Image (spheres, grey):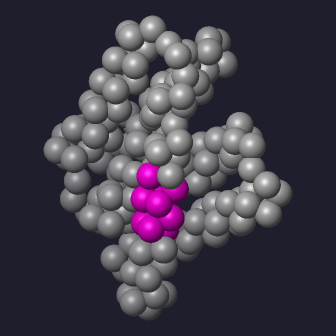
Amino acid sequence: MDTCVVRALRGFVVASLLGGGALLLAFARIVQVAAEPWVYFTAILWAAALVLLTMLRVGPHVVPSASLIASLLLGIAWAHLESNGHLVLSALGPVAAILAGIGLARGDRWAWPVGLVVVAGIGPLFLTFVPLPTGVYAAAMALLVADAIVLLLIRDGPAGAARTSV
């Protein structure tokens, strides 16, 4: 695939992840749910740790990938077991989307699997909880499907997500 096409496709996914993450964060339950202070502190501290880990490029690429994906899975498990988990997951999901968008824009190798998890897993999961008109829901699902296809197309392309360094 042509380098310009790959960059344009990557830009599409980056914009989608950044925009979607920002919208989710703006409407996150973290500001809409009454909870004990320790729950807010946990959500903010956890999200901040993920931001630092990815932005400082700590360790090999598997460290930020695994940390973000494991955090999302732990957030889902917590949400299943206790209502406070929904609040934490509503902070972690958007943060993971935004970080994946930034990582893809920078060409960080760790960002591709996180982006795929966000668009093929967390994004559709979040849509099941948000009361949306049918047309908006359909458009959001179409965007997530398009993002997933584009991520699969650019995986090994020139200037795609796979960079040889961290």
| Residue 98 falls left or right of residue 130 | left
Q: Name the residue rendered at 69%, 46% in the picture.
A: 127
Q: Residue 129 in the image: x percent, y percent?
A: 71, 37
Instruction: Tell me: residue 33, above or below residue 3.
Output: above
Q: Name the residue rendered at 34%, 76% in the picture.
A: 159
Instruction: Tell me: residue 146, above or below residue 56.
Output: below
* Residue situated in front as seen by the camera: 42 or 107: 42
* Residue situated in front as seen by the camera: 8 or 36: 36
Q: Is residue 115 visible?
A: no
Q: Residue 140 in the image: x percent, y percent?
A: 68, 60
Q: Is residue 62 visible?
A: yes
Instruction: Tell me: residue 106, above or below residue 83.
Output: below
How many marks are shown on the rendered structure?
Answer: 0
Q: Name the residue rendered at 51%, 37% in the picture.
A: 28
Residue 16 within the segment the image draws in magenta = yes
Residue 123 within the segment the image draws in magenta = no
Characterize the magenta stretch by its predominant secondary structure: helix
- Looking at the rendering, the stretch of residues picked out in magenta corresponds to 13-22
The quadrant holding residue 128 is: top right
Q: Name the residue rendered at 33%, 66% in the picture.
A: 105
Instruction: Tell me: residue 23, above or below residue 28.
Output: below
| Residue 74 falls left or right of residue 62 | right
* Extreme-right residue of the structure: 134
* Residue situated in front as seen by the camera: 158 or 46: 46
Q: Residue 164 in the image: x percent, y percent?
A: 26, 63
